[in-house]
Image (spheres, rainbow, N blue to C red):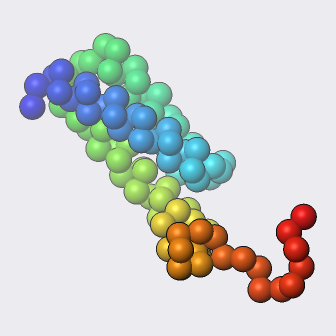
Amino acid sequence: MSLDEAKEEAEAVIDSAEMLLDTFPGEGKTARELQGKITELEQEVQDPDSERSLRKLINDVKELMDELEDQGMESDPMGPGMEEGMDDGMGGPQEPEDDMPPF
């Protein structure tokens, strides 16, 4: 891959990582590490030392994203992707089972 392609991938990874931080907000160690690596990657995209250094940072960010997702799923069992069984069969949300009207 060329340096330009690595830059494009880095920008896409940065966007994904930022969205992930929005999805799984927190002040945990992994979230802080990910934020730091995002900053490093943004700086590297602006002034890359080499394709290799850019690739290493991309891989570091991806690994931290995976860790953060795993931690988020463990702490929130109803997190993203777990809503499949929560509809009424018609694609809408389930209604409460009591006879109280909605407010």
Seen at 77% across and 79% down, the residue is: 96
Residue 17 visible? The answer is yes
* Image quadrant where residue 77 sits: bottom right
The x and y percentages for residue 91 are 53, 69
Camera-side residue: 49 or 98?
Answer: 98
Quadrant of the drawing holding the N terminus? top left
Quadrant of the drawing holding the C terminus? bottom right
Seen at 48% across and 66% down, the residue is: 81
57 left or right of 90 in image: left
Q: Is residue 93 above or below residue 47?
A: below
Q: Is residue 44 above or below residue 96?
A: above
Residue 75 visible? The answer is no
The x and y percentages for residue 62 are 35, 47
**Total of numbered circles in the picture?**
0
Camera-side residue: 102 or 25?
Answer: 102
Seen at 42% across and 41% down, the residue is: 16
Q: Is residue 96 above or below residue 4?
A: below
Seen at 53% across and 51% down, the residue is: 30
99 left or right of 23 in image: right
The x and y percentages for residue 84 are 50, 74
The x and y percentages for residue 88 are 59, 78
